[in-house]
Image: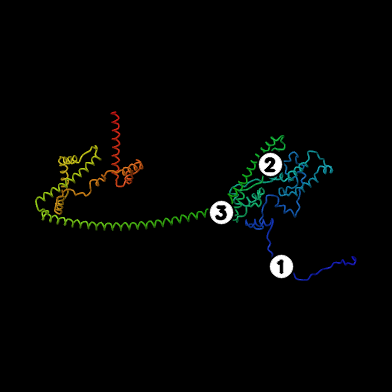
Amino acid sequence: MDSAVDESPFTVIIKGGLSPLIQVELEPVGVWYHQYEHNRRHGHSQEDKVTESDNSDDSKERENKEIVIQDDITFLRSLDPCKWKDQDHYRVLGLHEYRYKASDEDIKKAHRLMVLKHHPDKRRGAGEDVRDGDDYFTNITKAYEILGDPIKRRSYDSIDPEFDNKVPSDKPINKEKFFEVFGPVFERNSRWSQRKHVPQLGTPQDSKEKVDDFYDFWYNFDSWREFSYLDEEDKEKGEDRDERRWIEKQNKAERAVRRKEENTRIRKLVDNAYKLDPRVIQFREAEREKKLSVKRAKQEAARHREEQELQERIRLEEEERLRKAKEEAELKERLAREKKEREQMKKQLRVERKTMRDMCKEADYFIVEEKDRVQVRHLLLDVLSCVQMCWWDVVAKYLCQHGPNKEPRSSKDVLQKAKELQNSDASALKEATLKSATGQLVGCDKKVEKLEKMDGSSVSAQASERLETPAEMLGVNLSPWSSEEQARLEQALKTYAANTPERWDRIAEAIPGRSKKDCMRRYKELVEMVKAKKAALQAAGVKK
């Protein structure tokens, strides 16, 4: 049956139409999703390169090509096994071209090839003279021991002898070719970053946000570079625990110093770049121009506001001037009108007074009998004497309070002294002086005579009669103090101390019906009473 099967080739033709194409939207996931989100947030295109700190950048490129291991036998034979720490381990394994970009598989492959080719047994079999303990194969073993261990390899990569630690200066010559000078330096130093996706220097057309993100990243650069490979002493060589601790302490101090120098180097690189970056200078100039424009706008607004305030002030001053002028004119008009009214009233009063005098004179002052005339005269004398006595009482009290010697004087003493002065030569001399001074005035006598004719009386008449009482004239309340007023006075004296401004005004406000002079006079009376009481007590004590 099997032999009957025809094994000749044949062609199968399928006839029929294909279904139409359907567009399906796919969402990125996994690593590509993170790459997509990073590019979208930071404004990168899909072609932008993202530098990482480890060996993953070039591992993808080498997936499709084989690495080339360079076997430099001359270099290997020149090595000193005792100075293995100073050798270039990548060059020993033939990975000088790849260095830190070589993967772990590349290192294993290079070591396997070197072992197969340079093992002492292989070379002895080929007739080569191999000396035990002094062979370069020891250097190959040490190189793989360092590079095959991720921790030791990281320590060696930190002090890679092929790495250029130089920092471009901030001289103006580097400003002209800023991106050509600083771009490779930042790309070279990005391998030390702990974080992935290290931003690069960029282009002159980058936005301000992108430039700020770049410098923000590098000013806060977190380096994984450590310098344990340069430790002068190995703590494992310590004889006891204390010596090992001491060695570790010394090594940590030296690493801290080197790490500080590394941070200073990175900071200097960023500072020099920030100083010479034309984008930063452009942004700074734009910001300065913006501030100046805002400042000029504020100054212009302030100047405009001041002009408006000045105009408003001028307008208000003009209105105030016009208002005052109007008020002054109205005041002058009112005063003139009032003066005219007063003159009219005075004139009318004079006429009425003259009419009244003439009428009384013609009626003989309405006296029918002679005894009425005597009674009126005695009544006027009594009123006049009473007024005079009250007046001289006031003068006597004033002299007691304000006189130079403060001696008590009665109204009769004061009246008698006034009469003596009136009759003395000084009084006569004073009257003569006044009369001579009055006579010297041009036309004074004529005016006096004119006034006497108009008024019908003499200019040297008695003074006008006062309607106020003597107490009111002095502002003194002669009524006795009540217990309530006395209590209020004592409380006010306690409340308002001696250094209180306008003390007696405030004390007078606290006592209704009493003035400032009343309060002061009462206070002096109380002081005198207290002094008299003390003097009496002292005198009584002396008698005992």
Amino acid under label 1? Leu
Count of numbered badges drawn on the protein: 3
Depth check: give the residue in front, 222 or 533: 533
The residue singled out by tag 3 in the image is 283
The residue singled out by tag 1 in the image is 21
The residues bearing labels 3 and 1 have C-alpha atoms spaced at a distance of: 51 Å
Dot 3 or dot 1, earlier in sequence:
1
Mark 1 residue element: loop
Residue 385 as seen in the image, left or right of residue 94: left
Amino acid under label 2? Ser
The residue singled out by tag 2 in the image is 228
Crowd tier of the residue under label 3, counting other residues whose Cα lies within 10 Å: few below 14, some 14–19, many 20 or above? some
**Mark 3 or mark 1, whichever is nearer to me:** 1
Q: In the drawing, what numbered circle is on residue 95?
A: none
Dot 1 or dot 2, earlier in sequence:
1
Q: Quadrant of the C terminus?
A: top left
Residue 497 in picture, x, y percent from top left:
35, 41
At x 73%, y 69%, the residue is 19
Residue 270 in picture, x, y percent from top left:
61, 48
